[in-house]
Image: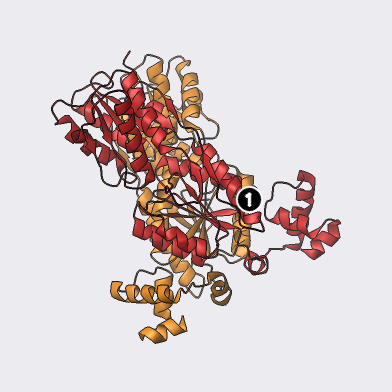
Chain colours: A orange, B red
Amino acid sequence: MKDIAKDLGVSVVTVSKVLRNHSDIGEETRERVLKRVKELDYRPNLTAQSLVTGRTFLVGLIVPDLVHSFFAEVARFLSNALRQEGYYLVISSSEEDPSLEEREIDQLLGRNLDALIIASASASPAIFRRIEEQQTPFVLIDRQFPGFPANFVGVDDESVGRLATNHLIENGSKRIAHLRGPESTPGVQRLAGYKHALQNSGLKFNPAYLLSPGNVDVDSLQQGYSAMKKLLAIEPRPDGVFCYNDPLAIGAIDCILDAGLRVPGDIAVIGCGNLHFNTSLRVSLSSVNQHSRQIGECTAQLVLQMIKSKTPLPPRNIIVEAEVIARRSTLRS
Amino acid sequence: MKDIAKDLGVSVVTVSKVLRNHSDIGEETRERVLKRVKELDYRPNLTAQSLVTGRTFLVGLIVPDLVHSFFAEVARFLSNALRQEGYYLVISSSEEDPSLEEREIDQLLGRNLDALIIASASASPAIFRRIEEQQTPFVLIDRQFPGFPANFVGVDDESVGRLATNHLIENGSKRIAHLRGPESTPGVQRLAGYKHALQNSGLKFNPAYLLSPGNVDVDSLQQGYSAMKKLLAIEPRPDGVFCYNDPLAIGAIDCILDAGLRVPGDIAVIGCGNLHFNTSLRVSLSSVNQHSRQIGECTAQLVLQMIKSKTPLPPRNIIVEAEVIARRSTLRS
């Protein structure tokens, strides 16, 4: 690198930044450096570099499911923002299994990544203490733990539950069911928001209308379909359903239509995540938008600040405002 | 590691395998090792280990788009298969841009990953020669280059085009349009299959029915919608459309329905990729299944063989059989 810098009359830092694809280098300089790099057939050995700098330029991301579009979207925006500064994502899926998540965290810690980003499937923050001990910067996304101070980027899930349920109430639903999420924060908090909204509108919470499908981030379509089938057998049946995520809601709508009922005429349905194909469904799906792009980009900025800071930064809590996107599945008029 | 092995009366290799989450260790041994590791609060330094073994236990994956469910599904199955042996995926998206893909390959090569897996957006295999020079094992998935001998796992795209087009013909379409893919192999080969199928059935190829939407793996819904709008303006308009991928097909169906026409009554539509929500769409979508699971798992096996082999292995060509999954969007009866 020194030779290249000397040849071109630029600093070693500049050469290093070009080699890591850093964004704050002018196009002309970048091209000159890359040309010279090619002529010399020089390849930086980042493994050796990382022993010197103490950085690997790798950031770990653990999500419950890669195929769930919400997490795929977050991963995409994260990855694009990080590589502007030469960082790459090492991706792992916990398959919504807390013990697998724990093993994956250990594995990634052992690889000395510069930071970890976790959408946790755990019910408790115990495993994150181990990350703190190792002083690896980490950010929780989508799922946080009340009372556990940690960096967090995501929506306020209580408000997600409240917004979705209020939207169903405003559009005429009175017997509102909830296909709930797992025992992690989003599941628990969305359920709390659902109950608060019912209470504030003077509607009674009916425990029979609360169902807990299985693995909601894996095979959700199927899970939503089966759970809805159970709801249809209840007398009187619900006239509105708030689903923990969009795939569950898509499965629920399929079940309602297959039973010969109308959406939203007989039963209104709202999901969460605002997936990009929601408008193309049998009935276009209303959803709470969690802003995957904002979550991905904010998390990238936060992680880069933490990696570059010479002293540990106090934990930050970045709340992205959720909003209802109303489509045909809830609009009765 | 030596101390732990001695304490428990097992080999160092066994301890190392447990620490890398290797699958061929019995559950009892695994638990004993992990218990002792926790007692000692031992953390393997894999960066140092990787300088000794020459391995990073990281495999790079470059895909055109992470949010496209097909690639997300491949990534999931790949990742799950690799971690059985302690390997992790470093993921990057080329956003369907060959020059970004080239930069990403250089970046990942500089990180000394043990292997690279690439679903290429390039029109030529030139950049892969650089990977060969560095003797990093690599596997092309989904997209190959005729005449360039390299490891490949994917479908035969000519047969994908033929199967899809024949399916439309068998179900009564006579004026068949094609929303084609990019200039990479799948785009070119599926187009060739489409033309062959028309020819074999005595149908004339009409250049006006061949459209090239923009970035087909990013914003495909929108691209499919706009391209279909152009097709609807042609006189006589097509009565069948074979789309390069499912998102394009979903956009095309939306456009046809919004124009007050019927699918498949007026125009039959088939896509490619068999996305997991295809049955929940406004019109359930027929598609050519490319078997993301088989591609992910075969690629993982191939990559692990290459990494472990002491001598370079001759390139292998693993063709996964494509098949038509017929749903309502093409079935006129």
Residues A168 and B161: in front is B161
Type of amino acid under label 1: Gln
* Quarter location, residue B10: bottom right
Residue under the point 45% across and 84% down: A3
Residue A237 seen in this snapshot: yes
Give the side of residue B240 with respect to residue A98, left or right: left
Q: Please identify the quadrant where the C terminus of chain A is shown.
A: top left
Residue under the point 45% across and 39% down: A190
Q: Is the residue B15 above or below the residue B248 in the image? A: below
Residue under the point 30% across and 19% down: A265
Residues A196 and A310: in front is A310
* Quarter location, residue A105: bottom right
Percent from the top left, x then y, of residue B165?
Answer: 33, 28
Give the side of residue B307 with respect to residue B215, left or right: right
Q: Secondary structure at mark 1?
A: helix
Q: Is the residue A208 above or below the residue B86 in the image? A: above
Q: Tag 1: Cα neighbours inside 10 Å, few (<14), some, or many (≥20)?
A: few
Residue under the point 81% across and 64% down: B3
Q: Is the residue B283 above or below the residue A313 in the image? A: above
- Residue corresponding to mark 1: B305
Q: Is the residue B65 above or below the residue B224 in the image? A: below
Residue A167 seen in this snapshot: no
Percent from the top left, x then y, of residue B305?
Answer: 63, 50
Give the side of residue A102 with respect to residue A178, left or right: right
Percent from the top left, x then y, of residue A234?
Answer: 47, 16
Chain ID for label 1? B
* Quarter location, residue A54: bottom right
Percent from the top left, x then y, of residue A11?
Answer: 40, 84
